Image (cartoon, rainbow, N blue to C red):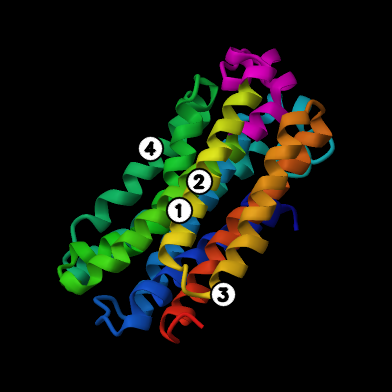
Amino acid sequence: MKYLNLIRYKNLLIIAITQYLVKYSLIDSYGYISVLSDFEFALGVLSTLLMAAGGYAINDYFDVNVDRINKSKTQVVGESIKRSTALAVHLLGTGLSIAIGWYLVYVTGWWILGIINPLFAVLLWFYSTHFKKMFVVGNLLIAGTTAFTAIVVVVLFCLAGSIKSPFQENLLVAYVYTGFAFLASWIREIIKDLEDHVGDSAMGYDTLAINFGMEKAVKFTFVLSFLMLALILFFGFIEFNGSVLALGYILILLVLPQTYFMMKLRKAKSIAQFKFLSRLSKAIMIAGVLSLPVFTWLSQNAWV
């Protein structure tokens, strides 16, 4: 179990589900010809999971000291797992991910697949060593990486040249979901920095929570949360105004939780409150991801 916690198995499961739902909802359900076999696509997803697992491991490897302050009760590396083991997990996961990427280059001829994984390996390494300590940079990098995992499936299909003009409508949906994933992830990263501000400050980090101060960081997060709520409302009521079920899903599982999140955020001050908000933001993100197949089904049934 300790190794599963090291690689954040729950987050990996969300990544895998997201990529399969994007493929099912925006590619397969509309009859577009897949440019990857099921096996090749599964390898691509596995490659993403291995890269993410390696990233989580190296992040904990470098976070041993700060985690003794911020996560003294749940710290894994330096307690139940040796640092050298965490480094080995990183090297193994990242190495296998890059190898799978180059195998896919060999079988598909898409050279871009051989570049993505090494690029992300470098970014995740420097995130752990430098970027996460820098003002805003670390938050934006993780938010961008999260958003990329949602859009990469569509991007690869388009780059392959098999998706023609009718797919443009689905591209809009993909871009909206990418924006949602970016904002949701950025908000959650700031919340986590607010939660960890004591240890981060002691280690000399320059996070938004430390640079702005707690109160201003909360206000900034509130603005981002409002933008995300506006995106949900705009997309939902413009795109799905003819469906009671779609609007019901949006209202109950996205709008109301996001509104509640914003209400609790305004009053949040303690670590426990920020920890709750972090969990809630993750639940909202999951609800957003799961809406993809729901809306696809509804669109194919005349928005019942």
Q: Nearer the viewer, mark 4 or mark 3?
A: 3
Apparent side of residue 77 relative to residue 88 in the rendered image (left or right): right
Crowding near the residue tagged with mark 1, few <14, some 14–19, many ≥20 C-alpha atoms within 10 Å = few
Residue 223 visible from this viewpoint: yes
Task: Check disc 3 and report the residue beneath it.
Answer: 244
* Disc marking residue 230: 2
| Residue for point 78% across, 44% down | 80
- Measure how far apart labels 4 and 3 are at the Cα level: 46 Å
Residue 32: quarter of image = bottom left
Task: Check disc 4 and report the residue beneath it.
Answer: 122
In the rendered structure, which amino acid carries the disc numbered 2?
Ala
Q: Is there CB contact under 8 Å for labels 1 and 4? A: no
Residue 304 in the image, given as x and y percentages of width and height = 51, 83
Apparent side of residue 207 relative to residue 73 in the rendered image (left or right): left
Q: Nearer the viewer, mark 2 or mark 3?
A: 3
- Measure how far apart labels 1 and 2 are at the Cα level: 6 Å
The magenta-colored residue range is: 190-216
* Disc marking residue 234: 1
- The residue lying toward the viewer, choosing from 126 and 264, is 264
Residue 24 in the image, given as x and y percentages of width and height = 42, 77
Going from the N terminus, do you reach mark 3 or mark 1 first?
A: 1
Q: Is there CB contact under 8 Å for labels 3 and 1? A: no
Going from the N terminus, do you reach mark 4 or mark 3 first?
A: 4
Crowding near the residue tagged with mark 3, few <14, some 14–19, many ≥20 C-alpha atoms within 10 Å = few
Q: Residue furthest front?
A: 242
Q: Is there CB contact under 8 Å for labels 1 and 2? A: yes
Residue 75 visible from this viewpoint: no
In the rendered structure, which amino acid carries the disc numbered 1?
Phe
| Residue for point 70% across, 13% down | 202
Element at label 3: helix
